[in-house]
Image (spheres, rainbow, N blue to C red):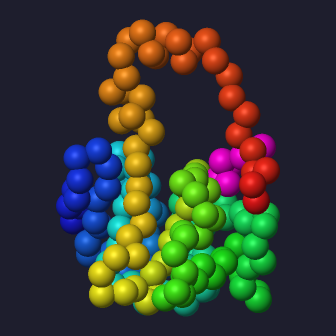
């Protein structure tokens, strides 16, 4: 496996991995380590069936059903996200972090692009770790005294 960083704050492409086949345990550990280090990982040109997608998801953790959208028949943890040409708002409508409001949130989300436009249509990722680390010490002290509620009320 070859790992190529793609940005300063986060993100890496992993090359030389065929997700259509079962992943050996040692490679599963390398992939998970890359995910933890880079926070977002990309595998290019992987044409996966829902079964293959789920098999790979299970190598990283326990897939969960999305509470507000019905999954594919036979694959309740896989949802289809479509954005048609005339639609102007992203899926979910606002900046969000998938299912972090659950009592036990999943470790992450997996996306599989089946059809992409020639330009635009970008999915943007942000590192909350980098954002926090860039704060002043005073702001970090202020935040340390606060609590928060993560909710899905808008859903």
Report x, y in % for residue 13.
Answer: 28, 65
Report x, y in % for residue 55.
Answer: 58, 76
Tell me which segment is drawn in magenta: 99-106
Tell me the residue at 68%/22% (across/down). 147
- Is residue 138 visible from the viewing direction of this image? yes
Tell me the residue at 38%/70% (across/down). 122
87 left or right of 44?
right
Q: Nearer the viewer, residue 32 or 88?
A: 88
**Magenta stretch: residue 105 in it?**
yes
90 left or right of 40?
right
Q: In which quarter of the image is residue 18?
A: bottom left
Tell me the residue at 61%/63% (across/down). 93
Tell me the residue at 37%/86% (across/down). 117
26 left or right of 144?
left
Report x, y in % for residue 83.
Answer: 54, 82
Quarter of the image for the C terminus: give it. Answer: bottom right
- Is residue 29 visible from the viewing direction of this image? no
Q: Quadrant of residue 23?
A: bottom left
Report x, y in % for residue 115.
Answer: 44, 89
Q: Nearer the viewer, residue 19 or 122?
A: 122
Q: Is the magenta stretch mostly helix, strand or loop?
A: loop
Q: How many labels does the image show?
A: 0
**Magenta stretch: residue 12 in it?**
no
Quarter of the image for the N terminus: give it. Answer: bottom left
Q: Quadrant of residue 89?
A: bottom right
Q: In this view, does 109 lie above or below 106?
A: below
């Amino acid at each position: 496996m070859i790992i190529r960083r793609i940005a300063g704050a986060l993100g890496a492409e992993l090359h030389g991995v065929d997700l259509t086949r079962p992943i050996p345990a040692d490679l599963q550990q390398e992939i998970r380590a890359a995910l933890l280090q880079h926070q977002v990982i990309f595998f290019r040109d992987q044409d996966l069936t829902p079964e293959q997608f789920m098999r790979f998801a299970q190598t990283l953790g326990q897939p969960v059903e999305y509470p507000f959208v019905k999954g594919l028949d036979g694959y309740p943890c896989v949802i289809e996200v479509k954005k048609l040409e005339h639609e102007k708002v992203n899926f979910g409508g606002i900046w969000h972090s998938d299912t972090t409001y659950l009592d036990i949130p999943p470790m992450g989300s997996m996306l599989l692009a089946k059809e992409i436009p020639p330009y635009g249509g970008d999915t943007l990722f942000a590192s909350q770790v980098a954002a926090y680390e860039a704060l002043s010490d005073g702001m970090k002290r202020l935040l340390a005294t606060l609590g928060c509620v993560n909710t899905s009320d808008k859903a």
